[in-house]
Image (spheres, rainbow, N blue to C red):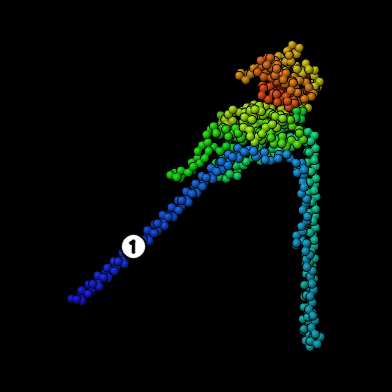
Amino acid sequence: MPRRKSFSSILKAAARESARAQRRAVAAQKQKAREHARAVREAEKQAKQEYLEQRLEKVEEINSEIAEWIQELNEIIEHTLKVNDTISFDELRVKETFPEIQIPQELESKTPTPILNKPSPPPKWLTNILPCIKQRYINSVKKIDLAYQAAKKNYRKIEQERIAKLEKYKTDYEKGKQAFAAKVKQRNADVDELEKAYRTGDSSAVATYNEMVLERSEYPSIQEYASLFLEYGYITSFPQNFRVAYVSDSKQLVIDYELPNTSIIPPIAEVRYVKTKDEIKSKARKATELKTLYQDVISAIALRCVHEIWEADQANLIEVVVFSGYVNTVDRAVGKDIQPYLISLRVIKDRFSELDLARVDKRLCLKNLGAQLSPRPTEMQAIKPIVNFEMVDPRFIEQEGDILSDLESRPNLLELSPSEFESFVASLFTQMGFETKLTRSSRDGGVDSIAFDTRPIVGGKVVIQAKRYRNTVGVSAVRDLYGTMMNEGANKGILVATSGYGPDAYDFAKDKPIELVDGSGLLYLLDSWFAQNREGLKSYPVSAR
C-alpha cells in the first residue's frame, strides 16, 4: 500500500511538471506571437510614417516649385536689369585657334627593325668527329635566314602602312586646319560686314543685330521644375518667337513678338495632402489672380524687350520702339487658330530712359506710356496693334519697285504736285471704303480730306491730311492735324506721308486717336488694295516712289 502511494505522488508530480512545462511552452509561443505582432505593427507603423512623410515631402516640393515659378515670373524685369544686353561684335569673332597636331603613339613610333641572330658555329674538331652536327647547324642557319627575310618583308609592309596612315593623318589635319581657318576668316568677315553695316544704319543689319539681342534674352524654363512639370505638364515655357524690322527714316524699330498664353501661369495655387483619402488635392487659382499674374507677365515682357533693345543700342540708331505682342491660340467657338494681339506700345527713347524699371508698376507704367492693353487678356480679347508689321517689313519694302507693275509709266509719288498727291490719297481712301471728300486748302484750315467711316460704333468722321515730304515729318504737322480734328469734331485723324516721322511726332500721337502712315505704310496700303483691285488705280497718276 505505501508503495502505491509513492507511485501516485511521483505520477502526480510528473503530471504537474508536464503541465507546467506545457504552460511554459504555450506562454512562450504566445509571447513570441505577441512580439512578432508587435514587430509587424511597428514595421507597418514605420512604413505608414515613411509613406506619410513621402507624401508630405511631395506636397512641399510641388508647393515650393509653384512658389519659385511664380517668383520667376514676377522677376522677369529684375532679371534683365542684372544683365548687360549690349552685344560685342568682337565677341562674335572667332578667337579660338586650331589645336596643335597630336599624332597617335602607334603612328609616331617606328616599327622595331628585325634583328638577325645567327647561332655560333660548332667547334671544328666536333664537326670532324660528328659531321651530322655541321649539317644540323647549316640547316638551322637556313631557317633563321628565311625567318629573317620574312620578318624584313613584314617589317617593310607594316612600316609602309604606318607611314601611309601617318601621312593621311597629317593631310587630314592640314585640311581640317585650312577649313577651320577659312571658316574663321569667313565668320570674322561676316561679323566685320555686319558691324560696318550696323554702324552705318543699314536697315537689315540693324534688324539682325536686334534679333540677336532678343534671342540672347534668357527667360525662365519650366523644365527646371520637374515636379510641377511632371504633375501638371500643360504649363508652358516662353516661346520667344518674334519678327524685327527697322525704319531708318524715323529711326523706328518695330517688334512683332509672340507672347506665352495663359498656361504660363500654374492654374493651381497650392496643393495639400488629404490623409483620409490618401490623395494630393490641388486648390485652383482664383480667376482674378490668374488675370493679374498674366497681365503682369505680358506687361513685363513688353517692358523688358524695349529695355533690352535700348540698352544694346550701342550706335544710337533707335529713337522709337514699337512692340506688339500676340498669342498663338485657338478660337474655341470655331476651332480655328488665331493670333490676337494683347499689347501694343510705341515709345520714344527719352521717355523710356526716365523710367526706373525696378520700381514701376508694370501695367500702370505701360498705360502711362500710351500702350494699348487688352482689357481681358486671359479671354484673349484682341486689341489693334499700333503698327501693322507688314507695313514696315523690309521684305516688302525691298520689292517696292514691283508693287504697281501696271503703273510703272506713271509719275513717281514725289513728282506729284501737293494737290495731286492730296487727290491721290483721298482717292485711295475712297477705294478702301471710306466716304471721302477732298477739301480746299485755302478755306479748311489745313484739312486735305474729310472722310466718313461708315462702320457702326467704331466708325465716324475722319480727318485725313497728306504730306508729300522728302524729309522727316516733325511734330508740328501732327499738332496741326490734332487741332483740325478738334475744330472738325472728328473721331480720328490720319496723317499720310511719303517719308518717315520723328520721335516727337510719335510721342505726341501716342495717346490720341491719330494714325501716322509713313512712306512704307503707304506702299503697303497701295499693294494690299491693288492686289484686290488690279484695274482700280490705272486712272490715278501714281507709281511706286
Looking at the picture, how far across and down is residue 117, in whole percent?
A: 79, 75
Task: Tell me the quadrant of the picture where the C terminus can be found.
Answer: top right
Q: Residue furthest left?
A: 1
The residue nearer to you, when weighing 30 against 158, is 30
* Image quadrant in which you'd find residue 116: bottom right
Within-10-Å neighbours for mark 1: few <14, some 14–19, many 20+: few
455 horizontally vs 201: left or right: left
Query: In the rendered structure, which amino acid carries the disc numbered 1?
Result: Ala
Could you tell me if residue 233 is visible in this image?
no
The vertical placement of 104 against 98, above or below, is: below
Kindly identify which residue carries mark 1.
Answer: 27
Looking at the picture, how far across and down is residue 237, in whole percent?
A: 61, 39
Q: Residue at x 55, y 34 (%)?
A: 290
Total numbered badges shown on the rendered structure? 1
Task: Tell me the quadrant of the picture where the N terminus can be found.
Answer: bottom left
The residue nearer to you, when weighing 536 against 333, is 333
The vertical placement of 212 against 399, above or below, is: below
Could you tell me if residue 66 is visible in this image?
yes
Q: Residue at x 75, y 44 (%)?
A: 91
* Image quadrant in which you'd find residue 443: top right
